[in-house]
Image (tube, rainbow, N blue to C red):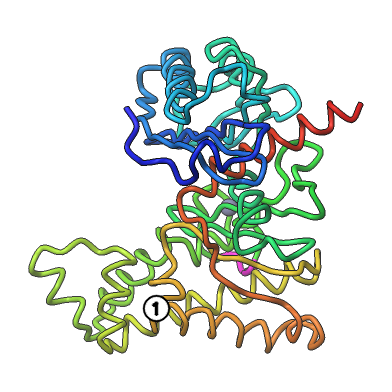
Amino acid sequence: MSENSPSVARDASRSPYYVGVDLGGTSVKVGVVDDLGCPLSHLSIPTESAAGPEAAVERMGRAVRDAIVDAGLTGADISRVGLGSPGTMDIPAGKLIAPVNLKGWDGFPIRERLAHHCGLDVSFANDGAAAAYGEFWVGSGRLFHSMVLLTLGTGIGGGIIIGDLSIDGENSHGAECGHIIINDADDARMCNCGRRGHLEAYASATAVIRRTRETLEAGRASSLSARLDAGAKLTPKLVAKEAAVGDALSLEIVDQTARYLGVGITTLMHTIDPGCVLLGGAMTFGGKDSELGRRFLAEIKAEVGRRAFPLLAERITLDFASLGPDAGFIGAAGIARLEHRRKASG
Ligand SMILES: [Zn+2]
């Protein structure tokens, strides 16, 4: 079942061990992680959410056991399992409330059911918080005491870590960074959540596609038109590709997206004053390895420079996340590790 070779050999790893589970709408990533945050094994299975939550957690339990075997360990070697799940959720109760990407899973007691199927204690976290904790523990945030992660994809997810604490909120709705307000006008863009003016309605992948389409329909010339006429699908990747070869409209879309993010990030900086703000998820316009990605980051910084307190704008570190799609399961394991240590120290 395993797709990947272990990242660290069993003999070089440090006990105790944890399993991280990153539940998404289409796939579930599961991996064994050691006490230093190094993965020993990881694998991915389809969520098959339409078959219902009980069938899915049963397969997730099997995947946890497979990942443990792949790592050369047994269940007795595992101190705890961490589960990161999309919201909405009730974290203390270990239940989903009404997850948008898991239709029909409303009210499911997922923490207890996964614990039953894998035979191990489970810690429960929001997927954004888990990814943020992964970056904080061993990724781009590891040198900072506090950080914010924004994951740019279909929506904008987020996580806020201060010290070793994930900001989950009184009602498990903390760190909803995609839903901070950047436009209070009555005709502000409608967010995926059904309210207007939120950051996600302007700077998510969905928003980038919508804004690009609107500009093209308004008659702006762009090399995108020929690509779309030839059958290409309008995606942020296509916009990035055309921007990288100098298409003015595509560049404008990327720059404008950066400015919207700069506005949202300034609000987060004035609220939290974190050591760093990281950008992750599928839409990073090439990230730090591409000229366009570096320009995207520079535009965000410039907007922050125009809007934030000068001292904060000068000191903030804005960077890309570094763990990619592994952040979720590594961070979920990290959150399990925190709970294990908390319980062990009494
Ligand atoms: Zn919203």
Total marks shown come to 1
Mark 1 Cα within 10 Å, few/some/many (few <14, many 20+)? many
The quadrant of the picture occupied by the C terminus is: top right
Which residue lies under the disc numbered 1? 253
* Residue 203 x, y percent position in the rendering: 49, 66
Q: Is the residue 185 above or below the residue 131 in the image?
A: below
Q: Residue furthest right?
A: 346
- Left or right of 117? Residue 162 is right
Frontmost residue, 290 versus 188? 290
- Left or right of 159? Residue 49 is left
* Residue 302 x, y percent position in the rendering: 60, 88
**Mark 1 within 8 Å of ligand 1, using the beta carbon:** no
For the stretch drawn in magenta, the main secondary structure is loop
Where is residue 269, by image quadrant? bottom right
Q: Is the residue 266 above or below the residue 343 in the image?
A: below
User: Residue at the location (76% across, 37% down)?
Assistant: 338
Frontmost residue, 85 versus 101? 85
* Residue 116 x, y percent position in the rendering: 58, 10
User: Residue at the location (70% across, 69% down)?
Assistant: 276
Q: Secondary structure at mark 1?
A: helix
The quadrant of the picture occupied by the N terminus is: top left
Frontmost residue, 341 versus 305? 341
Q: Which residues are magenta?
A: 182-187
Residue 186 magenta-highlighted: yes
Kind of residue indicated by mark 1 = Ile
User: Residue at the location (59% across, 57% down)?
Assistant: 178
